[in-house]
Amino acid sequence: MLENKNQDRTSLSSLGEFGLIDHLTKHFSLQHSTSVKGVGDDAAVLESSEKQTVVTTDLLVEGVHFDLSYMPLKHLGYKAVMVNLSDVYAMNAEAEQITVSIAVSNRFSLEAIEELYAGIQLACHTYKVDLIGGDTTSSNKGILISITAIGKAPKEDIVYRDGAKPTDLIVVSGDLGGAYLGLQVLEREKQVFQVNPQNQPDLENYSYIIERQLKPEARKDIPRLLRDLEVKPTSMIDISDGLSSEIFHICTQSKVGCKIYEDKFPLDPQVISTCEEFDIDSTMVALSGGEDYELLFTVSINDFDKIKGNPHLTVIGHITEKNQGLNLVTRANQEIALKAQGWNSFEE
Amino acid sequence: MLENKNQDRTSLSSLGEFGLIDHLTKHFSLQHSTSVKGVGDDAAVLESSEKQTVVTTDLLVEGVHFDLSYMPLKHLGYKAVMVNLSDVYAMNAEAEQITVSIAVSNRFSLEAIEELYAGIQLACHTYKVDLIGGDTTSSNKGILISITAIGKAPKEDIVYRDGAKPTDLIVVSGDLGGAYLGLQVLEREKQVFQVNPQNQPDLENYSYIIERQLKPEARKDIPRLLRDLEVKPTSMIDISDGLSSEIFHICTQSKVGCKIYEDKFPLDPQVISTCEEFDIDSTMVALSGGEDYELLFTVSINDFDKIKGNPHLTVIGHITEKNQGLNLVTRANQEIALKAQGWNSFEE
C-alpha cells in the first residue's frame, strides 16, 4: 500500500478503446453454458432458461467510494465485482454473468488498468461468473467502475425484501462492523504516512478488519446453505450501507416492525478491540458501519431448529407488528428506537 | 440552448441516494410482462422466456461524449438510452429493459437531474422499454451515465457481426454524416456565443442535422421491417463510430473483404449543403462521422429483390473475398483502401 503505482507506463491512448477492450478481456474465458456470446459484438447473448433472471448494477467512483492511496487496483477490481454479486445472492439467486464499464483518466497507465482487471478476473474465477461485455472510455478525472450483474434462480426460490412477517426471526450471516473499522485504520495510517513517509505501519493486529475493507467476499455460500437446510427466507437484503439502514428497508417494504438485541450482534474480537482502541461504540459500528456485504434475512420461527447453532448465522431479533416500530434492545434491557443511518454520498 | 440551467435549485444531498432514486423513478411504470420486479430490491427480476437474452452497456461521460453547453439534459437522457437500444437492435432483437446509473457532482440540482430522467422516461415510453434498476451517486466532477440494455429474440433471429459472406450486399438504413455535422454547427455556435452572448443563432437551415446530434433515434423499426420482408441479415452492427470503423468490424469478424461505392452513400441534402459551407468532404463525413445510430448490415444477394427501392434502406456495396481487402470505389471509379477511423476517447 501507499506505494508509487506508476513504475511501468504504457499510455491508454496507444491502444485506443477497441484495442483496450480486446487487451483486457482476452484472458477471460466463459464458464457458463448460458453465456452464448461474450465480449465482441454489439451485445452479449445469453441462453434461454426456465429460471427467472435477476439484474443489478452498481457504480463505484474514485474519491467517493474508494481511495487509491490505500486501495490497490487489483483489490478494487475484486471488490467492485463483490458489491454486485452480493446483490444477486441477496435475491437468493446464483450469479452467472457481469458486464464491466470503466471510465479512466489518462493519468492511469495500461499496467494500472491491467491490475484492476486482474482483480476482476480473480473474482470471476473464484465466483464462477462470466465477464460478457462492457465499455471503456476516458474520464476527465479519476476512475469510475460501473458493473451490472446477472443471475438466475427458479421463480419459487427468489426472495424479495417485502415478505417479512411478525414473529419471523431476523438473522445475519458472518459478523458486522469489520469493514468500517478497517477503513478507520487505513485512514489513520494514510495520515501517518503523509507526515512521515518512512514509517512502516505494523497492521498485523488489524489484518481481519483490513481484509474486510479491502477484499470483502460476497456470501455466495449462504443461499446454498439455506437450500441445504431447507430454509427459504421470507425476506433478504445484503448489508452494504449498515445493519440499521437495511433493517429499515425490510421493515418498510414488508410493512412490519422489529426488535433487535444489542447483545446478539455478531462481532469479531478484532472489531471489539479496535473499537476500544478508537473509543467507538461497537453497537454503533455494527448498526451503521456498512460495506460488510453480509446477508440480512428473516425466516419463519418454525425454521429456528434448522438454523440454530450454525456458525455462519446469528439470530439478532425478530419481526413485530408495524405499530410497534423499529427498536433496539440494549444490554441494559432498554428499548430505543432505531434510526436509519444509511450513508449519503451527496453530503458534503 | 446555451442558457442558465440553474434557476431553481434543490440540492441533491437534501434527498440522499435512496430518496433520489425513489424520486426519479416513481413515475416510471413497467410495460413488459417479463419485468417481474423493477426498482426497489437488491436486484430486478425478469421472467423466464424461450428467447435468448441480449445484454449491452455503454458509458457516457461529460466533456468526453457530450457538452452540456449545447446538449440539454433531457436530450442527453434520451440519447443515452438510444445509444444502448441501438446495440440491441443491431443484434436483430427487441429491447425490453434498461438499468440507468448516474454519477453527478453537487453542482447539479435536483431539477437538472429530473430533466435528465424526463428524457430517459420519454425514451422508455416511446421505445417501450422498462427502467428496472440503477444506481445514483456523487462524482467529483461532472456527470456520467452508465446504461445497460436487455433485449430478447428467438435464437434463430439473432444476427452477429461474423456472418458476412462474399457476394453479400452491404446495406445501411437512413442516411449518414448528419450527427457529426450537427456537432460542427453546435460547436461553431458555442464559440460565437462565447464572443457575443447576445447573439441569437438562426439554426433553421441546420434543423435536421442538429436533431441527428441532439436527439438521435435508434432504428427499432429496421429489425421489424426486415422480418416483414422475410430477410435475415447475415451480419449486422450499429453505426456509432462511423461507417468505416463498423465495416472494419464486420469484415474482420467475418474474415471477408468489401467494396463500397462513394456514389451510393445516402446523404441528406442538409448534409451536402453543410459540407459545402464548412468545406468538408461529404464522403469523409459519411465514413468517419459517427453517432448516426443507423444500422449497417449484410444480406444475401438473393434477397436483393426484397429490399430494393425501400426508402429506409440503401445498398452501398458488397462483400468480397478477404484477400481483396476493404476498398472504396470513388466517383472517379478509382479504388482506394479503406481505413478504420474509429474515434478514440483516450487521444489527448
Image (cartoon, coloured by chain):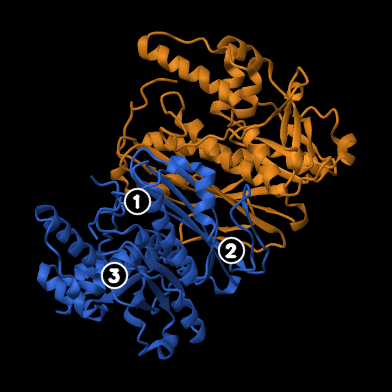
Chain colours: A blue, B orange
Please tell me whether mark 2 sits on a helix, a strand or a loop: strand
Residue A335 picture quarter:
bottom left
The residue where tag 3 is placed is A211
Pinpoint the chain carrying mark 2: A
Q: Given this view, does label 3 or label 2 mark the residue nearer the observer? A: 3
The residue where tag 2 is placed is A53
Mark 1 is surrounded, within 10 Å at the Cα level, by few (under 14), some (14 to 19) or many (20 or more) other residues, namely: few
Residue A80 lies, with reference to residue A154, above or below; the image says: above
Please tell me whether mark 3 sits on a helix, a strand or a loop: helix
Question: What amino acid type is highlighted by mark number 2?
Answer: Thr
Question: What amino acid type is highlighted by mark number 3?
Answer: Glu
Q: Residue at x 27, y 67 (%)?
A: A179
The reply to whether the C-beta atoms of the residues labelled 1 and 3 are less than 8 Å apart is no
The alpha-carbon separation of the residues under discs 3 and 2 comes to 31 Å
Residue sitting nearer the eye, A108 or A299: A108
Q: Residue at x 33, y 26 (%)?
A: B7
